[in-house]
Image (cartoon, rainbow, N blue to C red):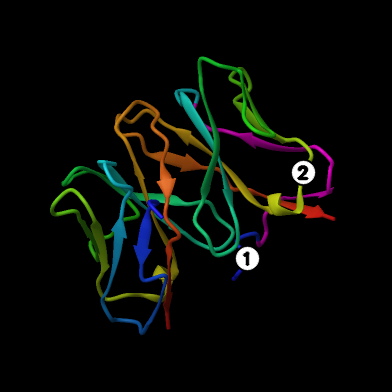
Amino acid sequence: GESVGLHLPTLSVQEGDNSIINCAYSNSASDYFIWYKQESGKGPQFIIDIRSNMDKRQGQRVTVLLNKTVKHLSLQIAATQPGDSAVYFCAENIRSGYSTLTFGKGTMLLVSP
Amino acid sequence: DTGVSQDPRHKITKRGQNVTFRCDPISEHNRLYWYRQTLGQGPEFLTYFQNEAQLEKSRLLSDRFSAERPKGSFSTLEIQRTEQGDSAMYLCASSLPAGGDTQYFGPGTRLTVL
Protein backbone atom coordinates (compact mmCIF):
# COMPACT_ATOMS: atom_id res chain seq x y z
CA GLY A 1 0.00 0.00 0.00
CA GLU A 2 1.06 3.58 -0.44
CA SER A 3 2.70 5.43 2.38
CA VAL A 4 0.81 7.95 4.46
CA GLY A 5 4.10 9.14 5.87
CA LEU A 6 5.48 11.42 3.15
CA HIS A 7 6.93 14.63 4.57
CA LEU A 8 6.00 13.66 8.12
CA PRO A 9 8.26 14.01 11.15
CA THR A 10 9.88 10.64 11.68
CA LEU A 11 11.03 8.90 14.84
CA SER A 12 13.39 5.97 14.35
CA VAL A 13 13.99 3.60 17.25
CA GLN A 14 15.40 0.17 17.88
CA GLU A 15 13.19 -2.72 18.88
CA GLY A 16 12.86 -2.79 22.66
CA ASP A 17 13.44 0.93 23.12
CA ASN A 18 10.80 3.21 24.59
CA SER A 19 9.29 5.69 22.14
CA ILE A 20 7.85 9.12 22.84
CA ILE A 21 5.71 10.86 20.26
CA ASN A 22 4.72 14.46 20.87
CA CYS A 23 1.81 16.57 19.76
CA ALA A 24 0.93 20.22 20.25
CA TYR A 25 -2.77 20.87 20.11
CA SER A 26 -4.35 24.09 19.08
CA ASN A 27 -7.46 24.86 21.06
CA SER A 28 -7.44 25.52 24.80
CA ALA A 29 -11.16 24.68 24.84
CA SER A 30 -10.51 21.08 23.75
CA ASP A 31 -11.37 18.65 26.50
CA TYR A 32 -10.91 15.22 24.97
CA PHE A 33 -7.88 13.82 23.18
CA ILE A 34 -7.21 10.60 21.29
CA TRP A 35 -4.15 8.93 19.85
CA TYR A 36 -4.62 6.94 16.66
CA LYS A 37 -2.24 4.59 14.85
CA GLN A 38 -2.46 4.38 11.09
CA GLU A 39 -0.71 1.74 9.03
CA SER A 40 -0.22 2.19 5.32
CA GLY A 41 -3.44 1.78 3.36
CA LYS A 42 -5.59 1.39 6.48
CA GLY A 43 -7.89 3.58 8.53
CA PRO A 44 -6.81 5.09 11.85
CA GLN A 45 -6.90 2.65 14.76
CA PHE A 46 -7.79 3.85 18.26
CA ILE A 47 -4.94 3.49 20.77
CA ILE A 48 -5.77 5.48 23.88
CA ASP A 49 -7.70 8.54 24.95
CA ILE A 50 -7.62 11.07 27.78
CA ARG A 51 -9.96 13.72 29.09
CA SER A 52 -8.84 17.15 30.15
CA ASN A 53 -9.52 16.47 33.83
CA MET A 54 -6.61 13.99 33.80
CA ASP A 55 -2.91 14.47 33.13
CA LYS A 56 -1.91 10.85 32.64
CA ARG A 57 -3.54 7.65 31.50
CA GLN A 58 -1.99 4.23 31.00
CA GLY A 59 -2.92 1.37 28.73
CA GLN A 60 -1.14 -1.76 27.68
CA ARG A 61 2.42 -0.65 26.82
CA VAL A 62 1.15 2.88 26.13
CA THR A 63 0.87 5.99 28.28
CA VAL A 64 -0.62 9.32 27.33
CA LEU A 65 0.44 12.51 29.10
CA LEU A 66 -1.48 15.75 28.88
CA ASN A 67 -0.08 19.16 29.77
CA LYS A 68 -2.87 21.68 29.42
CA THR A 69 -0.69 24.60 30.46
CA VAL A 70 1.39 24.36 27.30
CA LYS A 71 -1.24 22.49 25.22
CA HIS A 72 0.96 19.46 24.78
CA LEU A 73 0.14 15.79 24.47
CA SER A 74 2.55 12.87 24.33
CA LEU A 75 2.29 9.17 23.65
CA GLN A 76 4.81 6.86 25.25
CA ILE A 77 5.20 3.33 23.91
CA ALA A 78 7.14 0.93 26.08
CA ALA A 79 9.32 -1.83 24.61
CA THR A 80 8.60 -0.76 21.04
CA GLN A 81 8.10 -3.59 18.55
CA PRO A 82 8.39 -3.68 14.75
CA GLY A 83 4.60 -4.00 14.60
CA ASP A 84 4.36 -0.54 16.17
CA SER A 85 5.77 0.99 12.98
CA ALA A 86 3.06 3.29 11.64
CA VAL A 87 1.98 6.92 11.52
CA TYR A 88 0.61 8.20 14.82
CA PHE A 89 -1.92 11.02 14.99
CA CYS A 90 -3.20 12.95 17.94
CA ALA A 91 -6.75 14.26 17.68
CA GLU A 92 -8.59 16.80 19.78
CA ASN A 93 -12.27 17.23 20.36
CA ILE A 94 -13.14 20.87 20.00
CA ARG A 95 -16.38 21.47 21.78
CA SER A 96 -18.48 22.79 18.95
CA GLY A 97 -21.24 20.71 20.43
CA TYR A 98 -21.01 17.86 17.96
CA SER A 99 -17.88 15.90 18.82
CA THR A 100 -15.94 16.39 15.60
CA LEU A 101 -12.25 15.60 15.82
CA THR A 102 -9.38 17.76 14.63
CA PHE A 103 -6.25 15.80 13.79
CA GLY A 104 -2.64 16.84 14.09
CA LYS A 105 -0.15 16.30 11.27
CA GLY A 106 1.12 12.92 12.41
CA THR A 107 4.47 11.36 13.23
CA MET A 108 5.91 8.33 11.51
CA LEU A 109 7.42 5.76 13.88
CA LEU A 110 9.99 3.39 12.37
CA VAL A 111 11.08 0.47 14.52
CA SER A 112 14.18 -1.45 13.48
CA PRO A 113 14.62 -5.07 14.59
CA ASP B 1 -15.85 -8.62 11.95
CA THR B 2 -18.13 -6.08 13.61
CA GLY B 3 -16.08 -2.96 12.88
CA VAL B 4 -16.86 -0.12 10.50
CA SER B 5 -16.91 -1.29 6.89
CA GLN B 6 -16.58 0.75 3.72
CA ASP B 7 -17.21 -0.09 0.10
CA PRO B 8 -15.53 0.04 -2.31
CA ARG B 9 -11.98 0.01 -0.96
CA HIS B 10 -10.61 1.54 -4.14
CA LYS B 11 -12.24 3.58 -6.88
CA ILE B 12 -10.64 4.93 -10.03
CA THR B 13 -12.73 7.29 -12.09
CA LYS B 14 -12.39 9.84 -14.82
CA ARG B 15 -12.77 13.54 -14.17
CA GLY B 16 -16.37 14.62 -14.44
CA GLN B 17 -17.88 11.30 -13.41
CA ASN B 18 -20.03 10.79 -10.31
CA VAL B 19 -18.99 8.36 -7.58
CA THR B 20 -20.76 7.00 -4.52
CA PHE B 21 -19.22 5.41 -1.45
CA ARG B 22 -20.93 3.44 1.26
CA CYS B 23 -20.21 3.16 4.98
CA ASP B 24 -21.69 0.66 7.42
CA PRO B 25 -21.05 1.74 11.01
CA ILE B 26 -20.61 -0.44 14.05
CA SER B 27 -23.98 -1.83 15.05
CA GLU B 28 -25.83 0.43 17.51
CA HIS B 29 -23.49 3.36 16.91
CA ASN B 30 -25.83 6.17 16.08
CA ARG B 31 -23.21 8.77 15.22
CA LEU B 32 -21.48 8.52 11.85
CA TYR B 33 -18.73 10.75 10.48
CA TRP B 34 -17.07 11.24 7.12
CA TYR B 35 -13.47 12.45 6.82
CA ARG B 36 -11.11 13.00 3.93
CA GLN B 37 -7.40 12.29 4.10
CA THR B 38 -4.77 13.30 1.57
CA LEU B 39 -1.26 11.90 1.45
CA GLY B 40 0.85 12.96 4.39
CA GLN B 41 -1.97 14.69 6.22
CA GLY B 42 -4.30 13.81 9.04
CA PRO B 43 -7.97 13.17 8.37
CA GLU B 44 -10.13 16.27 7.85
CA PHE B 45 -13.74 16.34 8.99
CA LEU B 46 -16.38 16.54 6.26
CA THR B 47 -19.76 15.84 7.83
CA TYR B 48 -21.51 14.11 10.70
CA PHE B 49 -24.84 12.36 11.33
CA GLN B 50 -26.70 11.52 14.46
CA ASN B 51 -29.14 8.84 13.43
CA GLU B 52 -30.54 10.06 10.09
CA ALA B 53 -29.99 13.75 10.80
CA GLN B 54 -27.00 15.47 9.24
CA LEU B 55 -25.94 17.81 12.01
CA GLU B 56 -22.76 19.44 10.81
CA LYS B 57 -20.97 20.02 7.53
CA SER B 58 -17.45 21.29 7.01
CA ARG B 59 -16.60 24.07 4.61
CA LEU B 60 -14.62 21.39 2.77
CA LEU B 61 -17.91 19.85 1.71
CA SER B 62 -18.60 21.69 -1.54
CA ASP B 63 -21.96 21.55 -3.27
CA ARG B 64 -20.66 18.68 -5.40
CA PHE B 65 -20.60 16.51 -2.27
CA SER B 66 -23.70 15.05 -0.68
CA ALA B 67 -24.06 12.60 2.16
CA GLU B 68 -27.10 10.70 3.31
CA ARG B 69 -28.06 8.33 6.05
CA PRO B 70 -31.69 7.62 5.23
CA LYS B 71 -32.51 5.03 7.88
CA GLY B 72 -29.96 5.95 10.47
CA SER B 73 -27.82 2.93 9.70
CA PHE B 74 -25.52 2.92 6.66
CA SER B 75 -24.47 6.14 4.96
CA THR B 76 -23.50 7.11 1.44
CA LEU B 77 -21.20 9.87 0.25
CA GLU B 78 -21.64 10.99 -3.34
CA ILE B 79 -19.28 13.21 -5.27
CA GLN B 80 -20.65 14.69 -8.46
CA ARG B 81 -18.54 15.89 -11.37
CA THR B 82 -15.34 14.64 -9.79
CA GLU B 83 -12.17 16.71 -10.07
CA GLN B 84 -8.56 15.62 -9.75
CA GLY B 85 -8.39 17.46 -6.44
CA ASP B 86 -10.98 15.06 -5.05
CA SER B 87 -8.40 12.27 -5.12
CA ALA B 88 -7.99 11.21 -1.50
CA MET B 89 -8.83 8.55 1.05
CA TYR B 90 -12.41 8.92 2.29
CA LEU B 91 -12.78 7.63 5.82
CA CYS B 92 -15.90 6.83 7.76
CA ALA B 93 -16.09 6.59 11.53
CA SER B 94 -18.82 5.82 14.03
CA SER B 95 -19.38 6.34 17.72
CA LEU B 96 -21.89 6.12 20.53
CA PRO B 97 -23.40 9.38 21.77
CA ALA B 98 -21.56 10.77 24.76
CA GLY B 99 -19.38 13.75 25.49
CA GLY B 100 -15.91 13.05 24.06
CA ASP B 101 -16.99 9.81 22.46
CA THR B 102 -14.42 7.61 20.80
CA GLN B 103 -14.65 7.42 17.02
CA TYR B 104 -13.81 4.11 15.38
CA PHE B 105 -12.69 4.28 11.79
CA GLY B 106 -13.27 2.06 8.81
CA PRO B 107 -10.56 1.06 6.32
CA GLY B 108 -11.40 3.91 3.96
CA THR B 109 -12.15 4.23 0.25
CA ARG B 110 -9.20 5.33 -1.86
CA LEU B 111 -10.45 7.56 -4.72
CA THR B 112 -8.27 8.31 -7.71
CA VAL B 113 -9.59 10.80 -10.26
CA LEU B 114 -7.78 10.66 -13.60
**Numbered range of the magenta stretch:** A6-27
Q: Is residue A21 visible?
A: yes
- Say which residue appears at 32% left-offset and 27% top-offset: B98
The answer for which chain carries disc 2 is: A
Instruction: Classify A17 as above or below B8.
Output: above
Instruction: Classify A76 as above or below B71.
Output: above
- Say which residue appears at 25% left-offset and 41% top-offset: B30
- Badge 2 local density, few (<14 within 10 Å), some, or many (20+)? many
Is residue A21 shown in magenta? yes
Is residue A38 shown in magenta? no
The kind of residue tagged 1 is Ser
The image quadrant where one finds the C terminus of chain A is bottom right
- Give percent across and percent down for residue A108: 69, 52
State which quadrant residue B61 falls in: bottom left
B114 vs B103, nearest the viewer = B103
For the residue labelled by badge 2, is the local secondary structure a helix, a strand or a loop?
loop
Question: Which disc, if any, is residue A80?
Answer: 2
- Give percent across and percent down for residue B4: 37, 53
